[in-house]
Image (cartoon, rainbow, N blue to C red):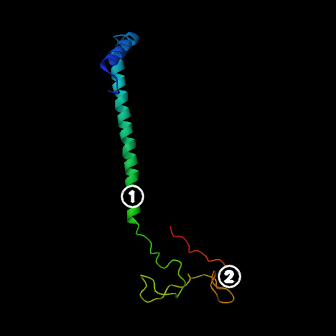
């Protein structure tokens, strides 16, 4: 038990008996037992809480399907995507302002490309 042999345990018990006396020794043992039981209960609750949190996180990851990123970064009309049998890709989202020369933002006008909006 904790690397303590019989002789060491006997010496500890004798010192405790001398220090506290024979009348208080049963009360001391009872309170020590209650403390250990409460510590075990609290540690089990913490362990259960951690397990529940890990389970919720793994469930949340598995319920969301992965996004289809097969057409990400392709220019419109450059060919068919894996999930687009007609070969047409959706145009810019509604409300996207067009430039005076008719080019979409981030194309041949020399502007940096605009990343798609994040969902989430």
Residue 56, image x, y percentages:
39, 56
Q: Badge 1: few (under 14), some or many (20 or more) residues near its Cα, within 10 Å?
A: few
Which element type, helix, strand or loop, lies under badge 2?
loop
Residue 3, image x, y percentages:
34, 26
Q: Earlier in the sequence, mark 2 or mark 1?
A: 1
Q: Quadrant of residue 84?
A: bottom left
Q: Residue at x 41, y 51 (%)?
A: 53
Q: Residue 26: in sight, yes or no?
A: no
Q: Quadrant of residue 41?
A: top left
Q: Residue 64: in sight, yes or no?
A: yes
Q: Are marks 2 and 1 in contact (CB under 8 Å)?
A: no
Horizontal arrangement in the rendering, residue 102 relative to residue 72 (left or right): right
Q: Residue at x 38, y 38 (%)?
A: 43
Q: Residue at x 55, y 83 (%)?
A: 75
Identify the residue position indicated by label 1 in the image: 58
Q: Is residue 48 above or below residue 82?
A: above
Residue 114 or residue 25, whichever sits in front: 114
Residue 48 or residue 67, whichever sits in front: 67
Q: CA distance from mark 2 to mark 1?
A: 44 Å
Horizontal arrangement in the rendering, residue 110 relative to residue 45 (left or right): right
Identify the residue position indicated by label 2 in the image: 110
Q: Residue at x 36, y 29 (%)?
A: 36
Which quadrant of the rendered structure holds the N terminus? top left
Residue 91, image x, y percentages:
54, 85
Q: Badge 2: few (under 14), some or many (20 or more) residues near its Cα, within 10 Å?
A: few
Residue 70 or residue 92, whichever sits in front: 70
């Amino acid at each position: 038990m904790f690397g303590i042999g019989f002789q060491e345990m006997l010496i500890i018990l004798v010192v405790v008996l001398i220090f506290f006396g024979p009348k208080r020794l049963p009360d001391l043992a009872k309170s020590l037992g209650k403390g250990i039981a409460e510590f075990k209960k609290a540690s089990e609750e913490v362990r259960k809480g951690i397990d529940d949190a890990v389970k919720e996180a793994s469930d949340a990851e598995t319920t969301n399907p992965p996004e289809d990123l097969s057409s990400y970064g392709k220019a419109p009309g450059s060919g068919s995507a894996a999930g687009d049998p007609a070969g047409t890709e959706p145009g810019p989202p509604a409300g996207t302002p067009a430039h005076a020369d008719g080019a979409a933002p981030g194309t041949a006008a020399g502007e940096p490309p605009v990343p798609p909006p994040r969902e989430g």
